[in-house]
Image (spheres, rainbow, N blue to C red):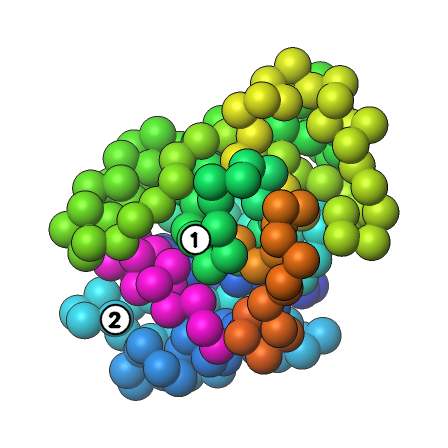
Amino acid sequence: MEPVHIVTDKKNIAPLVLFPGDPLRAKYIAEKFLTNIKLVNKIRNMYAFTGYYKDKLVTVVGSGMGCPSASLYAYELFTFYGVEKIIRIGSAGANKENIKLMDTVLSIGAYSESSIAYQWGGYTDKFIESNNELNEIIKETAKEQNIDIHVGPTLTSDVFDVYASIDHVINTCPIKDELLATEMEGFGIFHVARICKKQASMLITIVDSKFDTRVVSPEMRETHLDNMIILALESIIK
């Protein structure tokens, strides 16, 4: 079987991938941080760019929103294009009062009520860890770059929790008091990395909070997440 969502020469995809949800954020990252960039996929406008960060070849691919979209793109990258490492970089809502807007969170694993792991392989566990080796690299790189990060488990939701309360989901979670933030893709990406025996981690920037009435604008979400992007790039090339 051939991939149908990312269609390009295998040589056009680097083994190291940054994975923003927004394809326009992928374009922004490629144009601002990479050199000798090449557009290698635009099917469904899910842009993928490959270029050099310092002396390492890196691909930046949009994942779309939610576990189903992110999972299928991650699977194609791991299975058909030989990708070894994916760092998801995205936005999230804070679950803790001490985590402020524009703070960066490193997810050590994602809890979810999503059925994607069960549908894709019969897995029944609701918490999936990210890759510890990659996480340790990110933590060390954050120190080197003087970038403050929060480290802990996160929640992956199937709904945008700004529009619909998910308190009833959080309240039944056995690690509810530990969950730092809520986003929509991590659980699916970590599951696919597990079944493909590859590495995946996730960095997310806080753009809304139940403890703050302010929200980060759509434009800022696309173009003002540079600390997280730099941390991801510096980490993935190690």
Q: Which element carries disc 2, helix, strand or loop?
A: strand
Residue type, numbered disc 1: Asp
Q: Nearer the viewer, residue 110 or 180?
A: 180
Callout 2, which amino acid? Tyr
Q: Is residue 20 magenta?
A: no
The residue carrying mark 2 is: 53
Q: Local crowd at mark 1 within 10 Å, few (<14), some, or many (≥20)?
A: many
Residue under label 1:
103
Residue 45 drawn at (x, y percent): 67, 78
Determine which quarter of the picture holds residue 131: top left
Q: Nearer the viewer, residue 99 or 4?
A: 99
Tell me where the magenta segment starts and ends, as one range. 222-238
In the rendered image, which quarter is residue 227 located in? bottom left
Q: Residue at x 72, y 40 (%)?
A: 157
User: Is there any visible trace of residue 82 in the rendered image?
Assistant: no
Of residues 171 and 185, which is closer to you in this image?
171
Nearer to us of marks 1 and 2 is 1
